[in-house]
Image (spheres, grey):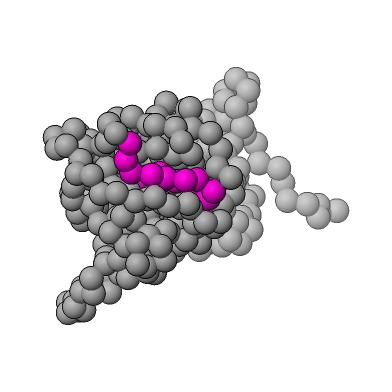
Amino acid sequence: MPENHARTPEPSRDGAASESAGYTADPVTADAAAAGPVSSDPVTSRPVTPDGGTSAPGASDGGAEARPAAPVAGRRSTAPQDGTGVPSQVFVWLKEVATVVVIAVVLSFLIKTFLFRAFYIPSESMVSTLDINDRIFVNLLVPEPFAISRGDVVVFRDTQGWLAETPAKEAGPFTWVQDGLTFVGLLPDNSEQHLVKRVIGLPGDKVICCDDGGKLTINGSRINETYVNAAETPQIRAFDVVVPEGKVWVMGDNRNHSADSRSHLDSNGGFVDLVDVEGRAAVIAWPLNRVTVLGNYPDVFRNVPAGK
Protein backbone atom coordinates (compact mmCIF):
# COMPACT_ATOMS: atom_id res chain seq x y z
CA MET A 1 0.00 0.00 0.00
CA PRO A 2 1.51 3.35 -0.97
CA GLU A 3 2.69 5.54 1.93
CA ASN A 4 0.79 8.69 2.68
CA HIS A 5 3.80 10.47 4.12
CA ALA A 6 6.68 11.95 2.21
CA ARG A 7 9.81 9.95 2.43
CA THR A 8 12.24 11.30 5.04
CA PRO A 9 15.37 12.48 3.21
CA GLU A 10 18.57 10.86 4.20
CA PRO A 11 21.16 13.19 5.63
CA SER A 12 24.10 13.90 3.40
CA ARG A 13 27.49 12.87 4.42
CA ASP A 14 28.50 16.39 5.24
CA GLY A 15 25.25 16.88 7.13
CA ALA A 16 25.89 13.77 9.12
CA ALA A 17 29.26 15.03 10.10
CA SER A 18 27.77 18.32 11.20
CA GLU A 19 25.01 16.56 13.11
CA SER A 20 27.51 14.41 14.91
CA ALA A 21 29.34 17.53 15.97
CA GLY A 22 26.19 18.95 17.58
CA TYR A 23 25.19 21.40 14.83
CA THR A 24 21.75 21.70 13.18
CA ALA A 25 20.61 23.46 10.06
CA ASP A 26 19.73 27.18 10.34
CA PRO A 27 16.05 27.90 11.07
CA VAL A 28 13.89 29.39 8.39
CA THR A 29 14.37 33.16 8.27
CA ALA A 30 11.60 35.70 8.52
CA ASP A 31 11.83 36.47 4.82
CA ALA A 32 11.37 32.82 3.83
CA ALA A 33 8.52 32.37 6.28
CA ALA A 34 6.77 35.38 4.82
CA ALA A 35 7.08 33.97 1.32
CA GLY A 36 5.31 30.72 2.22
CA PRO A 37 6.09 27.23 3.53
CA VAL A 38 9.16 25.48 2.25
CA SER A 39 8.73 21.86 1.05
CA SER A 40 11.26 19.15 0.42
CA ASP A 41 11.97 17.37 -2.85
CA PRO A 42 11.40 13.62 -2.15
CA VAL A 43 14.13 12.68 -4.62
CA THR A 44 16.95 15.05 -3.83
CA SER A 45 16.02 15.86 -0.23
CA ARG A 46 16.83 19.47 -1.00
CA PRO A 47 14.64 22.37 0.18
CA VAL A 48 12.39 23.69 -2.54
CA THR A 49 12.32 27.49 -2.84
CA PRO A 50 9.03 29.32 -3.34
CA ASP A 51 9.70 29.66 -7.07
CA GLY A 52 9.85 25.89 -7.48
CA GLY A 53 13.63 25.52 -7.71
CA THR A 54 15.91 23.68 -5.37
CA SER A 55 18.75 25.21 -3.43
CA ALA A 56 22.16 23.73 -3.44
CA PRO A 57 23.71 22.70 -0.15
CA GLY A 58 26.55 24.84 1.16
CA ALA A 59 30.12 23.55 0.91
CA SER A 60 31.39 24.70 4.25
CA ASP A 61 28.44 24.65 6.69
CA GLY A 62 27.43 20.98 6.45
CA GLY A 63 24.63 21.59 3.94
CA ALA A 64 23.03 24.48 5.79
CA GLU A 65 21.91 27.29 3.57
CA ALA A 66 23.66 30.63 4.24
CA ARG A 67 21.09 33.24 5.11
CA PRO A 68 21.23 36.67 6.81
CA ALA A 69 20.52 36.66 10.54
CA ALA A 70 17.06 37.71 11.62
CA PRO A 71 16.84 40.96 13.61
CA VAL A 72 16.94 40.48 17.38
CA ALA A 73 13.65 41.22 19.09
CA GLY A 74 13.68 44.42 21.24
CA ARG A 75 16.80 45.95 19.68
CA ARG A 76 16.35 49.56 18.59
CA SER A 77 17.06 50.64 15.09
CA THR A 78 20.24 52.60 14.61
CA ALA A 79 18.78 54.63 11.77
CA PRO A 80 19.35 58.40 12.24
CA GLN A 81 16.43 60.39 13.58
CA ASP A 82 15.30 63.65 12.08
CA GLY A 83 15.01 65.43 15.49
CA THR A 84 11.28 66.07 15.14
CA GLY A 85 9.77 67.05 18.53
CA VAL A 86 13.08 67.85 20.22
CA PRO A 87 12.85 71.40 21.75
CA SER A 88 15.30 73.95 20.49
CA GLN A 89 18.25 74.55 22.79
CA VAL A 90 17.91 78.29 22.19
CA PHE A 91 14.26 78.19 23.27
CA VAL A 92 15.18 76.30 26.46
CA TRP A 93 17.93 78.82 27.26
CA LEU A 94 15.63 81.79 26.67
CA LYS A 95 12.98 80.20 28.89
CA GLU A 96 15.49 79.78 31.73
CA VAL A 97 16.70 83.38 31.38
CA ALA A 98 13.13 84.70 31.37
CA THR A 99 12.32 82.68 34.50
CA VAL A 100 15.35 84.08 36.35
CA VAL A 101 14.49 87.66 35.31
CA VAL A 102 10.87 87.32 36.47
CA ILE A 103 11.93 85.88 39.83
CA ALA A 104 14.50 88.68 40.28
CA VAL A 105 11.93 91.38 39.50
CA VAL A 106 9.34 89.91 41.88
CA LEU A 107 11.87 89.55 44.70
CA SER A 108 13.19 93.06 44.12
CA PHE A 109 9.67 94.48 44.25
CA LEU A 110 8.88 92.64 47.48
CA ILE A 111 12.15 93.73 49.08
CA LYS A 112 11.65 97.34 47.94
CA THR A 113 8.08 97.35 49.25
CA PHE A 114 8.59 95.73 52.64
CA LEU A 115 12.29 95.66 53.61
CA PHE A 116 14.76 97.94 51.83
CA ARG A 117 14.62 100.75 49.31
CA ALA A 118 17.42 102.41 47.37
CA PHE A 119 18.02 106.18 47.25
CA TYR A 120 20.76 108.42 45.98
CA ILE A 121 22.18 111.54 47.65
CA PRO A 122 21.88 114.69 45.50
CA SER A 123 23.28 117.31 47.91
CA GLU A 124 26.08 117.98 50.38
CA SER A 125 23.93 118.45 53.47
CA MET A 126 25.18 115.19 55.05
CA VAL A 127 28.90 115.49 54.26
CA SER A 128 31.10 113.86 55.48
CA THR A 129 28.78 110.98 56.42
CA LEU A 130 27.19 110.93 52.96
CA ASP A 131 28.72 112.35 49.79
CA ILE A 132 26.96 113.60 46.68
CA ASN A 133 25.86 110.71 44.42
CA ASP A 134 26.19 108.09 47.14
CA ARG A 135 23.67 105.26 46.82
CA ILE A 136 22.12 104.10 50.07
CA PHE A 137 19.77 101.35 51.19
CA VAL A 138 17.03 102.42 53.58
CA ASN A 139 15.54 100.05 56.15
CA LEU A 140 11.76 100.36 55.77
CA LEU A 141 11.09 98.67 59.11
CA VAL A 142 11.91 101.94 60.91
CA PRO A 143 10.01 103.74 62.45
CA GLU A 144 7.50 100.86 62.37
CA PRO A 145 7.64 98.17 63.67
CA PHE A 146 11.09 99.14 65.02
CA ALA A 147 11.33 102.43 66.89
CA ILE A 148 13.41 105.33 65.66
CA SER A 149 16.42 106.40 67.76
CA ARG A 150 18.42 109.55 68.26
CA GLY A 151 21.30 109.63 65.82
CA ASP A 152 19.51 107.65 63.10
CA VAL A 153 19.99 108.92 59.55
CA VAL A 154 16.50 108.95 58.06
CA VAL A 155 14.94 109.53 54.66
CA PHE A 156 11.57 111.31 54.70
CA ARG A 157 9.05 112.65 52.23
CA ASP A 158 8.91 116.41 51.75
CA THR A 159 5.31 117.19 52.69
CA GLN A 160 6.14 120.56 54.31
CA GLY A 161 7.59 122.31 51.25
CA TRP A 162 11.20 122.32 52.37
CA LEU A 163 12.40 121.78 48.81
CA ALA A 164 11.98 124.34 46.06
CA GLU A 165 9.72 123.29 43.24
CA THR A 166 11.61 121.92 40.27
CA PRO A 167 10.40 122.04 36.67
CA ALA A 168 9.01 118.82 35.31
CA LYS A 169 11.58 116.83 33.35
CA GLU A 170 10.84 116.07 29.74
CA ALA A 171 10.11 112.43 29.12
CA GLY A 172 12.62 110.68 26.89
CA PRO A 173 12.10 107.58 24.77
CA PHE A 174 13.28 105.33 27.58
CA THR A 175 11.94 107.24 30.59
CA TRP A 176 9.31 104.55 31.12
CA VAL A 177 12.07 101.96 31.45
CA GLN A 178 13.81 103.97 34.18
CA ASP A 179 10.52 104.60 35.97
CA GLY A 180 9.66 100.91 35.84
CA LEU A 181 13.03 99.81 37.22
CA THR A 182 12.74 102.42 39.97
CA PHE A 183 9.23 101.20 40.81
CA VAL A 184 10.36 97.59 41.27
CA GLY A 185 13.46 98.69 43.20
CA LEU A 186 16.18 97.82 40.68
CA LEU A 187 17.18 101.51 40.41
CA PRO A 188 17.48 104.06 43.25
CA ASP A 189 14.79 106.68 43.62
CA ASN A 190 16.06 109.80 41.83
CA SER A 191 13.04 111.94 42.64
CA GLU A 192 13.59 115.14 44.55
CA GLN A 193 10.64 114.61 46.89
CA HIS A 194 12.75 113.06 49.66
CA LEU A 195 15.30 114.43 52.11
CA VAL A 196 17.92 112.78 54.30
CA LYS A 197 18.90 114.11 57.73
CA ARG A 198 19.99 112.88 61.17
CA VAL A 199 17.48 112.60 64.01
CA ILE A 200 18.50 114.80 66.95
CA GLY A 201 15.31 115.08 69.00
CA LEU A 202 12.60 112.50 69.66
CA PRO A 203 9.03 113.22 70.85
CA GLY A 204 9.18 114.94 74.25
CA ASP A 205 12.84 116.03 73.90
CA LYS A 206 13.86 119.63 74.64
CA VAL A 207 16.62 120.60 72.17
CA ILE A 208 18.56 123.85 72.64
CA CYS A 209 21.34 125.52 70.70
CA CYS A 210 23.62 126.28 72.15
CA ASP A 211 25.44 126.33 75.50
CA ASP A 212 28.43 128.51 76.28
CA GLY A 213 30.74 126.11 74.47
CA GLY A 214 28.63 126.12 71.31
CA LYS A 215 27.28 122.59 71.91
CA LEU A 216 23.74 121.29 71.60
CA THR A 217 21.89 120.21 74.72
CA ILE A 218 19.10 117.61 74.82
CA ASN A 219 16.98 117.52 77.96
CA GLY A 220 19.70 119.53 79.69
CA SER A 221 22.52 117.11 78.69
CA ARG A 222 25.35 118.44 76.53
CA ILE A 223 26.33 116.25 73.57
CA ASN A 224 29.57 116.09 71.60
CA GLU A 225 28.52 115.49 67.99
CA THR A 226 31.41 113.51 66.52
CA TYR A 227 29.52 112.94 63.24
CA VAL A 228 29.44 116.66 62.32
CA ASN A 229 31.64 117.65 59.36
CA ALA A 230 34.97 118.58 60.95
CA ALA A 231 36.17 120.52 57.90
CA GLU A 232 34.20 123.59 59.04
CA THR A 233 33.25 125.06 62.40
CA PRO A 234 29.44 124.98 62.71
CA GLN A 235 27.84 128.40 62.81
CA ILE A 236 25.67 129.15 65.83
CA ARG A 237 21.98 129.34 64.94
CA ALA A 238 20.02 129.66 68.17
CA PHE A 239 16.79 127.71 68.78
CA ASP A 240 14.93 126.26 71.75
CA VAL A 241 12.25 123.69 70.95
CA VAL A 242 10.29 120.86 72.52
CA VAL A 243 9.51 118.06 70.08
CA PRO A 244 5.75 117.30 69.92
CA GLU A 245 4.32 113.80 69.94
CA GLY A 246 4.49 112.07 66.57
CA LYS A 247 7.33 114.27 65.30
CA VAL A 248 11.16 114.46 65.26
CA TRP A 249 13.75 117.22 65.04
CA VAL A 250 16.38 116.64 62.31
CA MET A 251 19.67 118.27 61.33
CA GLY A 252 22.29 117.71 58.63
CA ASP A 253 25.85 116.64 59.49
CA ASN A 254 27.24 119.40 57.26
CA ARG A 255 25.76 122.09 59.51
CA ASN A 256 26.79 125.13 57.49
CA HIS A 257 25.27 123.71 54.28
CA SER A 258 22.06 122.04 55.46
CA ALA A 259 18.56 123.51 55.24
CA ASP A 260 17.18 121.37 58.05
CA SER A 261 14.74 121.86 60.94
CA ARG A 262 16.52 125.08 61.93
CA SER A 263 15.67 126.66 58.56
CA HIS A 264 11.95 125.80 58.61
CA LEU A 265 10.69 126.93 62.01
CA ASP A 266 7.76 128.61 60.24
CA SER A 267 6.64 125.33 58.65
CA ASN A 268 5.29 122.79 61.13
CA GLY A 269 7.69 124.28 63.69
CA GLY A 270 10.61 122.75 61.80
CA PHE A 271 9.53 119.24 62.81
CA VAL A 272 9.16 116.18 60.59
CA ASP A 273 6.10 114.01 61.02
CA LEU A 274 6.93 110.38 61.80
CA VAL A 275 4.39 109.25 59.21
CA ASP A 276 6.54 110.94 56.55
CA VAL A 277 9.66 108.98 57.48
CA GLU A 278 10.37 106.33 54.83
CA GLY A 279 13.01 104.55 56.90
CA ARG A 280 16.49 104.57 58.38
CA ALA A 281 19.53 104.71 56.11
CA ALA A 282 21.38 101.48 56.82
CA VAL A 283 24.12 101.01 54.21
CA ILE A 284 26.10 102.97 51.64
CA ALA A 285 25.98 100.59 48.67
CA TRP A 286 27.76 102.67 46.00
CA PRO A 287 30.46 103.58 45.09
CA LEU A 288 32.30 100.44 46.08
CA ASN A 289 35.11 102.30 47.82
CA ARG A 290 32.55 103.82 50.20
CA VAL A 291 30.51 100.73 51.05
CA THR A 292 29.85 100.81 54.77
CA VAL A 293 27.18 100.35 57.43
CA LEU A 294 25.72 103.58 58.79
CA GLY A 295 25.57 103.83 62.57
CA ASN A 296 23.61 106.09 64.89
CA TYR A 297 26.46 106.95 67.31
CA PRO A 298 24.94 105.64 70.53
CA ASP A 299 27.89 106.94 72.57
CA VAL A 300 26.96 110.52 71.66
CA PHE A 301 23.48 110.15 73.20
CA ARG A 302 24.31 107.70 75.97
CA ASN A 303 23.90 110.21 78.82
CA VAL A 304 20.82 111.95 77.42
CA PRO A 305 17.84 111.43 79.75
CA ALA A 306 14.41 110.56 78.41
CA GLY A 307 12.17 113.42 77.35
CA LYS A 308 8.98 114.41 79.11
Is residue 250 covered in magenta? no
Image coordinates of residue 158 in percent, x first then y, are 36, 66
Q: Tell me where residue 18 sits by quadrant.
A: top right
Image coordinates of residue 165 in percent, x first then y, are 23, 74
Residue drawn at x 19%, y 54% is 123
Residue drawn at x 58%, y 61% is 34
Does residue 88 appear in this view? Answer: no
Judge by depth and name the residue closer to the eye, 216 or 50: 216
Residues rendered magenta in the picture: 198-211
Image coordinates of residue 4 in percent, x first then y, are 81, 55
- In screen coordinates, is 84 left or right of 76? left
Judge by depth and name the residue closer to the eye, 44 or 179: 179
- In screen coordinates, is 301 left or right of 90? right
- In screen coordinates, is 3 left or right of 211? right
- In this view, the residue farthest toward the front is 212
From the viewer's perspective, is residue 278 above or below residue 201? below
Judge by depth and name the residue closer to the eye, 259 or 213: 213
